[in-house]
Image: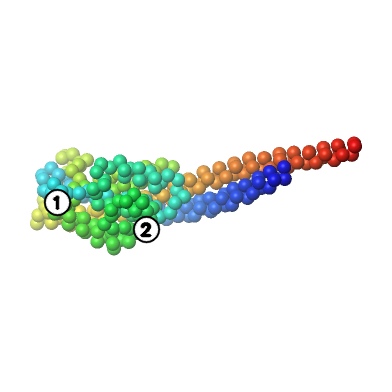
């Protein structure tokens, strides 16, 4: 009985320590959510304007065959994950979406975030560049690579630019998604087009704006992924804390029962000894 009490006490101490860790992580995520929301909402307004303009230009490109692609053109895939763990299935869901992309083994893969970099390395995937942090990405390095991608698109070497990330819906719902930033599809109808003339030529305007659009899109989705990450971590830590509390209650009940049984057994032994 004494050994059982000691073992239960040790488990209670371990669970209590873990509960303090998860509660602290929950508070940290709560403090980061407000800043992440502000950054996302502010930049989202700019992204929406840039995206609307680009859709107009891209519709013109697709329907009037303004750019020819090489038969050897490859896809570019950006993978955005978190820098830290303890966020439930946040990163695993993104990796599952990546594996669902057809012919992803032949694509140029760019991981953004420490978990994404680890995923690329552990799966033996080739990458032309690593962005080590999604929380504080190297924007200069990212801008330089976007310029290279824009030139490759112009030369017909890149066919699609995919983004595997997490879309934010609300504090409880964050959907892993594959987004095609540049391809042969458009969600615009011809009647939705602006009436405009292009001077001095389509290609000069299009590729100048394409570079800005790709960079703006990446920054916007990085902010959105980071916001989703903080909510996912907050929810995961809240669930873990609640589970730890339930375990402590069960362990405390087991401890009291074991202690009561020990006391009862000692009393019984004393009474039995007194009767001899």
Q: Which residue is mark 1?
A: 156
Q: Which residue is mark 2?
A: 133
Residue that sits furthest to the left in the current view: 200
Write down the quadrant of residue 247 in the picture. Answer: top right
- How far is disc 1 from disc 2 in space, using C-alphas? 30 Å
Give x and y (percent) for residue 8.
65, 45
Give x and y (percent) for residue 14.
60, 50
Residue that sits furthest to the bottom in the current view: 140
Q: Residue at position x 20%, y 54% from top?
A: 210
Give x and y (percent) for residue 249.
63, 42
Position of the C terminus by quadrant: top right
Q: Residue at position x 78%, y 38% from top?
A: 264
Observer-nearest of 174 and 71: 71
Q: Counting other residues with Cα less than 10 Å from the Cα at mark 1, is it few (<14), some (14-19), or many (20 or more)?
A: some
- Secondary structure of residue under mark 2: loop
- Secondary structure of residue under mark 1: loop
Write down the quadrant of residue 199 in the picture. Answer: bottom left
Is 177 left or right of 67, judged from the image as shown? Answer: right
């Amino acid at each position: 009985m004494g050994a059982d009490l000691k073992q239960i006490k040790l488990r209670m101490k371990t669970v209590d320590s873990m509960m303090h860790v998860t509660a602290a992580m929950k508070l940290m995520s709560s403090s980061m959510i407000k800043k992440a929301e502000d950054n996302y909402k502010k930049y989202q307004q700019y992204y929406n304007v840039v995206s609307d303009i680009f859709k107009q230009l891209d519709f013109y490109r697709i329907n009037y065959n303004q750019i020819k692609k090489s038969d050897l053109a490859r896809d570019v895939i950006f993978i955005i994950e978190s820098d830290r763990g303890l966020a439930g299935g946040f990163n695993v869901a993104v990796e599952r979406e990546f594996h669902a992309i057809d012919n992803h083994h032949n694509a140029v893969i760019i991981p953004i975030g420490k978990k994404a970099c680890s995923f690329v390395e552990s799966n033996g995937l080739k990458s032309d560049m690593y962005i080590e942090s999604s929380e504080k990405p190297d924007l200069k390095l990212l801008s330089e690579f976007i310029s290279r991608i824009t030139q490759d698109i112009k030369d017909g070497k890149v066919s699609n630019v995919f983004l595997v990330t997490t879309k934010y819906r609300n504090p409880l719902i964050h959907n892993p998604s594959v987004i095609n930033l540049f391809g042969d599809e458009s969600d615009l109808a011809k009647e939705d087009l602006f009436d405009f003339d292009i001077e001095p030529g389509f290609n000069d305007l299009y590729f100048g704006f394409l570079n800005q659009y790709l960079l703006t899109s990446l920054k916007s989705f990085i902010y959105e992924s980071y916001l989703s990450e903080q909510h996912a971590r907050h929810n995961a830590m809240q669930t873990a804390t609640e589970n730890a509390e339930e375990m402590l209650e069960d362990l405390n009940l087991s401890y009291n029962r074991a202690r009561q049984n020990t006391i009862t057994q000692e009393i019984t032994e004393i009474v039995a000894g007194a009767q001899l």
